[in-house]
Amino acid sequence: MTYAWLRVTFFSIYINATQADFLSVFSVSFSLYMLSIGGAVYYFYAKYGFRFTRLEILTSRHLLVRFNRKTQQVHLHRPTSCGGIATFPWRTTGSTGLYPEDDSLSVGMRLGLIWHPSRTGLPHMEMALLGKQGQGGGELRDEWEFIRRYMEEGPHAVPRPRLSTQLPSPIQAFSAQFDGLCRFFRNSSWLFKLAILIVWPAFVIIGTAHWISLLLCWRPRWPKVIREAGLPGKPVPSPTTLSDYPPEIQERLLANADRWQLKPGKRPEKKPRKPRTPRTRKIST
């Protein structure tokens, strides 16, 4: 649409400027009309529509989490429209991979890190999802235990992790569709496996689109104060507070702050029970 608009508009302006016999009131009006219509459309799009069609909608944006063992802090790197960069003390970090009784509910879920307002002092809860989709709660607990040991005991307390590439590999694009479902596929019936073979073109289309989004995305860069945190003589980043957000965002967060507070309640009064009437047994003769 942009190419067509520019071609028609500038071609009409070029004809008016180079061919005197073509110049007329209609041709000039048409050039001004096309120029004003296109300019108005893109002005309103840039002012009101761009927020709904950001580049992150068409790409797979990297949401980074950085663990600094020396400063005992956790940093979140997100787009400005999704919370921005935040810093939290490690002691305030909670996890969703704790309880064995929730194993059946954790299939296909990712490990979640949680910062509750009761521990951070913020009027809202923060959350970040890590890693691949697990095949059960045991995988999530193992991943959380790896992070906990690294932060509290050091690198010597955990096995050396496998490093993955940052290049947009097609294997990453196609394998992401089956994260957490390998065990389910192995134990499924032959009818379900046959259904998967029938719909395989859909997986190919989704995987290809995912790979294209990986090719279009970029890896964000941490601020200098976070990259140098923990080095000798370098400052320690301050934890995120409410004052770090814009005034309009602070107002919205404070408007919902009461949802995260425990409110004292009153136990309902017990209703008096009606006395039971003894049942009489009928004897048939």
Image (cartoon, grey):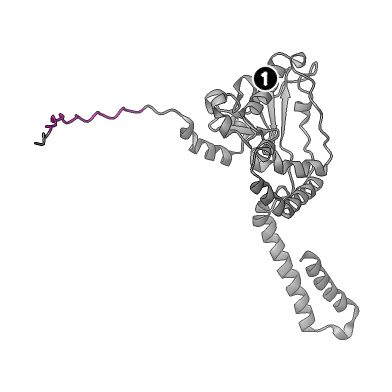
Q: Is residue 266 shown above or below 256?
A: above
Q: Amino acid at mark 1?
A: Arg
Q: Is residue 123 left or right of residue 32?
A: left
Front-most of 64 and 202? Answer: 202
At horizontal 64% and vertical 22% (from top left) the residue drawn is 89
Which image quarter: residue 137? top right
Residue 98 x %, y %: 58, 24
Front-most of 106 and 218? Answer: 106
The kind of secondary structure element at disc 1 is: helix
Q: Is residue 2 left or right of residue 282?
A: right
- Location of the C terminus (image quadrant): top left
Q: Is residue 270 left or right of residue 133?
A: left
Residue 122 x %, y %: 56, 29
At horizontal 80% and vertical 21% (from top left) the residue drawn is 160
Q: Which residues are magenta?
A: 265-281
At horizontal 11% and vertical 36% (from top left) the residue drawn is 284
Q: Residue furthest left?
A: 285
Dot 1 alpha-carbon crowd within 10 angstroms: few under 14, some 14 to 19, many 20 or more: some
Residue 274 x %, y %: 16, 31
Residue 76 x %, y %: 69, 32
Based on the picture, tell me whether residue 276 belongs to the magenta stretch.
Answer: yes
Q: Residue furthest front?
A: 285
Give the labeled residue for mark 1: 148
Q: Is residue 110 in sight in this rendering?
A: yes
